[in-house]
Image (cartoon, grey):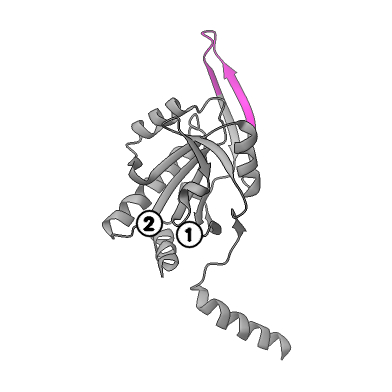
């Protein structure tokens, strides 16, 4: 009976899954980073008051990061079509030694990203490492190949993640970035707008 009562209370609190629980919280955090225009940016301060869709990337990635980034672009386009505003897109590189602002700008340009509400971030490695550690994103260097010309191809094994963060800096949901259901995250963003 006690267990049934507990389930009933949880059902009332979460209302058939309409609420998004708080997974983590960026409040009381402050990370000094640099955006794609080489401007100092304090995260999460610069997105306070906005819903944030965020992924974690490195620009040399051959598979997951381009898929995740393209899915974010599709989310951005769908939100614009449906006139859902107050959403900021953020891509944080966990490879700041290579992903300098100029490289991030080129990455955005090749992918035709609309930067009107999308910021790409890099910075000191200790800072980017602190951000990804905070949210449980793993990025482990993998095998590299160096060609006779000196050109190097390198990889990371990393978490495939897009995160939804509310206007108060609370992480509300994690999604698999490369295979995310665009309709699902758009519906979740609309829940946060209510």
Q: Is residue 142 magenta?
A: yes
Q: Is residue 153 left or right of residue 194?
A: right
Q: Is residue 138 above or below residue 183?
A: above
Q: Is residue 6 above or below residue 34?
A: below
State the predominant SS element of the stretch in magenta: strand
Mark 1: secondary structure: loop
Residue highlighted by disc 2: 86
What is the quadrant of residue 115 in the picture? Answer: top left
Residue identified by numbered label 1: 167
Sooner in the amino-acid sequence: mark 1 or mark 2: 2
Q: Say left or right for 145 vs 166.
A: right
- Check the image and name the residue furthest to the top: 148
173 in relation to 14, above or below: above
Screen quadrant of the C terminus: bottom left
Identify the residue shown where x is 67% and y is 88%. 5
Q: Residue at x 71, y 91 (%)?
A: 1
| x and y, in percent, of residue 159 in the image | 59, 44
Q: Residue at x 54, y 45 (%)?
A: 160
Magenta-colored span: 141-153
Q: Which is nearer the eye, 102 or 9?
A: 102
**Is disc 1 in contact with disc 2, using a CB cutoff of under 8 Å?**
yes
Q: Residue at x 41, y 47 (%)?
A: 72
Asked whether the viewer can see residue 20, the reply is yes
């Amino acid at each position: 009976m006690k267990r049934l009562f507990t389930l009933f209370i949880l059902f009332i609190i979460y209302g058939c899954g309409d609420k998004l629980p708080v997974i983590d919280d960026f409040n009381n955090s402050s990370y000094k980073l640099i955006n794609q225009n080489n401007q100092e940016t304090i995260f999460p301060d610069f997105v306070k008051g906005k819903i944030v869709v965020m992924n974690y990337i490195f620009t040399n990635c051959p598979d997951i990061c381009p898929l995740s980034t393209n899915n974010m672009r599709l989310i951005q386009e769908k939100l614009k079509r449906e006139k859902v505003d107050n959403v900021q897109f953020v891509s944080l590189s966990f490879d700041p030694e290579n992903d300098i602002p100029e490289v991030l700008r080129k990455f955005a340009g090749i992918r035709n990203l609309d930067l009107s509400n999308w910021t790409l971030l890099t910075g000191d490695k200790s800072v980017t490492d602190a951000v990804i550690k905070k949210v449980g994103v793993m990025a482990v260097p993998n095998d590299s190949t160096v060609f006779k010309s000196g050109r190097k191809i390198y990889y990371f094994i990393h978490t495939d993640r897009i995160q939804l963060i509310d206007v108060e800096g609370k992480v509300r949901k994690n999604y698999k970035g490369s295979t995310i259901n665009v309709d699902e995250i758009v519906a979740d963003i609309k829940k946060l707008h209510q």
